[in-house]
Image (spheres, grey):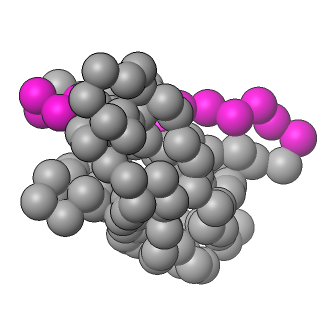
Amino acid sequence: VQLQASGGGSVQPGGSLGLSCTASGSIFSINVMGWCRQAPGKQREMVAYMRSGGNTFYAPSVEGRFTISRDSTKNTTYLQMNSLRPEDTAVYLCTVDAKEDYGRSNVRYWGQGTLVTVLQ
């Protein structure tokens, strides 16, 4: 399973950015699609994820500002980030829990990071 992320960039505080991530390859099913981020000198943190049934999780620091969605027909997840703050600056990584075949366990896959910079 390969993950291809796009989006990101630089924005002024209060601005918006969108990220997308598409999974491809040998995929039987995708359970969870989500986004983590890692800022310099900080631990990686889960930002948001969405289960196949539609349940979502948001980190308290982004709730109300970020929105995760997914298009299961395209194996794609989106992260709309509004009201961005300098502390949102980080490398954002796409992650999915997917099965490659019926009867196999979910495996977590990671995409390459995409940098989001919110200018001071």
Q: Position of residue 111 (x, y in %)?
A: 57, 56
- Is 65 situated above or below 76? above
Closest to the observer, 81 or 107: 107
Query: Magenta span has 47?
Result: yes
- 74 horizontally vs 27: left or right: left
- On screen, residue 69 above or below 104: below
Q: What segment is highlighted magenta in the picture?
A: 41-54
Residue appearing at x 49%, y 30% in the figure: 107
Q: Quadrant of residue 28?
A: top left
Residue 98, image x and y in percent?
37, 37
Which residue is more in the foreground, 101 or 2?
101
Percent x, y of residue 31: 28, 31
Picture residue at 61% right of the left edge, 32% below the top:
45
Residue 98 forms part of the magenta stretch = no
Q: Residue at x 11, y 60 (%)?
A: 73
The mark total stands at: 0
In the image, is 24 to the left or to the right of 30? right
